[in-house]
């Protein structure tokens, strides 16, 4: 009976009260989290920038973005708020790990993988970064291709696959909602992570609880909406929210922001349009 109650849990606006606490008037810069974003490549320069900007809009104090030179330099033109660390080369390489480790020391959480690409060395680098990282992480996009139990052991992790990426991670492709709930719960337990399976209904589990999120619009099929979600997840982790609640809240916020923009713009919705809408949702 208890299990059925967990399975039927639906994320609502009330999640905002659980993840956003009242701020002390004496708060200082950094009190509400410092996020590290690692991703980007020669081709995908916008992804890590969307992650970083979504993180800012959802409340984190500082975002540092480490990316290959072209991606980092382009990201720096998006907003003066972004702190960028250009990494020499066109894609993530093993010799970048030292810089990432140094940035980890001054970060409270990280988002790994957005726009990184799947060069052989990049995937090896992502695997090493994730295995060695000690702070809470969101693993998304190309980094999901290196996930297994050896990588996820003893980590605080949110994994944010769409159905195709979930199949890459697990070898399974659940189709019905019932199958998705069972499969996500089982693999979340196996990996020791929170899994947020993106879809028309997001399915979220920490291996015990299961939650459904129904915010979101069919106009959110554009590239970059997953980066927005990952940035919100990372922002909440950096602010000290535990992974399951962070994933639930991020799914609701991202979907609601998409709903607001979709009502105004319909098929012309772009992922970057959702950034200001995040502020309308959480403000």
Image (spheres, grey):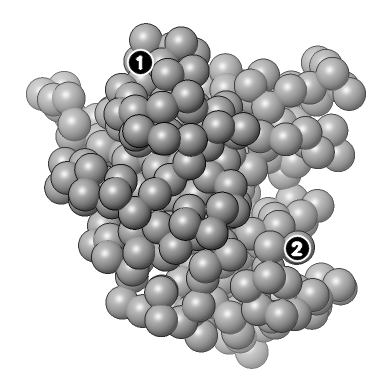
Residue 29 numbered mark, or none: none
* Residue 119 rendering spot, x and y as whole percentages: 56, 53
In this view, the residue farthest toward the left is 26
Q: Nearer the viewer, residue 145 or 230?
A: 145
Q: Is residue 129 left or right of residue 23?
A: right
Within-10-Å neighbours for mark 2: few <14, some 14–19, many 20+? some
Do the numbered discs 2 and 1 sit on residues whose CB atoms are within 8 Å? no
Up-down relation of residue 76 to residue 171 (above or below): above
Which residue sits at x=68%, y=70%? 168
Q: Is residue 111 left or right of residue 197?
A: left
- The reply to whether residue 235 is in sight is no
* Residue 109 rendering spot, x and y as whole percentages: 31, 49
Up-down relation of residue 21 to residue 18 (above or below): above
Which residue sits at x=79%, y=75%? 173
Q: Is residue 31 left or right of residue 78?
A: left
* Residue 277 rendering spot, x and y as whole percentages: 61, 21
Within-10-Å neighbours for mark 1: few <14, some 14–19, many 20+? some
Residue position for label 2: 163
In this view, the residue farthest toward the bottom is 1
Which residue sits at x=34%, y=34%? 87
Up-down relation of residue 61 to residue 163 (above or below): above
Mark before the other along the chain sequence, 2 or 1:
1
Q: Which corner quadrant holds the N terminus?
A: bottom right
Which residue sits at x=32%, y=40%? 36
Query: How far apart are labels 2 and 1 at the CA level?
Result: 33 Å
Q: Nearer the viewer, residue 151 or 204?
A: 151
Total numbered labels: 2
Say which element carries label 1: loop
- The reply to whether residue 220 is in sight is yes
Say which element carries label 2: helix
* Residue 121 rendering spot, x and y as whole percentages: 47, 57
Residue 81 numbered mark, or none: 1
């Amino acid at each position: 009976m208890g299990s059925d109650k967990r399975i039927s849990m639906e994320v609502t606006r009330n999640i905002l009260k659980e993840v956003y606490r009242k701020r002390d008037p004496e708060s200082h810069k950094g009190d509400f989290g410092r996020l590290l974003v690692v991703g980007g490549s020669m081709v995908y320069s916008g992804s890590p920038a969307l992650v970083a900007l979504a993180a800012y809009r959802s409340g984190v104090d500082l975002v540092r973005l480490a990316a290959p030179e072209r991606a980092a330099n382009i990201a720096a033109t998006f907003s003066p708020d972004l702190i960028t660390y250009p990494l020499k080369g066109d894609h993530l390489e093993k010799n970048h790990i030292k810089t990432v480790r140094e940035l980890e020391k001054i970060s409270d959480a990280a988002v790994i993988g957005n726009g990184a690409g799947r060069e052989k060395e990049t995937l090896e680098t992502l695997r090493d970064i994730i295995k060695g990282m000690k702070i809470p992480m969101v693993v998304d996009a190309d980094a999901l291709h290196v996930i297994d139990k050896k990588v996820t052991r003893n980590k605080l992790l949110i994994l944010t696959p769409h159905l195709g990426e979930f199949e890459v991670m697990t070898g399974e492709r659940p189709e019905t909602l019932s199958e998705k709930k069972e499969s996500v719960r089982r693999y979340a337990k196996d990996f020791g992570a929170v899994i947020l399976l993106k879809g028309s209904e997001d399915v979220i589990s920490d291996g015990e609880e299961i939650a459904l999120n129904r915010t979101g619009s069919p106009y959110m099929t554009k590239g970059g909406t997953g980066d927005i979600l990952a940035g919100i997840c990372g922002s909440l982790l950096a602010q000290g929210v535990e992974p399951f609640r962070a994933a639930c809240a991020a799914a609701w916020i991202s979907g609601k922001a998409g709903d607001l923009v979709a009502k105004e713009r319909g098929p012309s919705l772009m992922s970057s349009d959702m950034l200001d809408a995040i502020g309308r949702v959480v403000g």
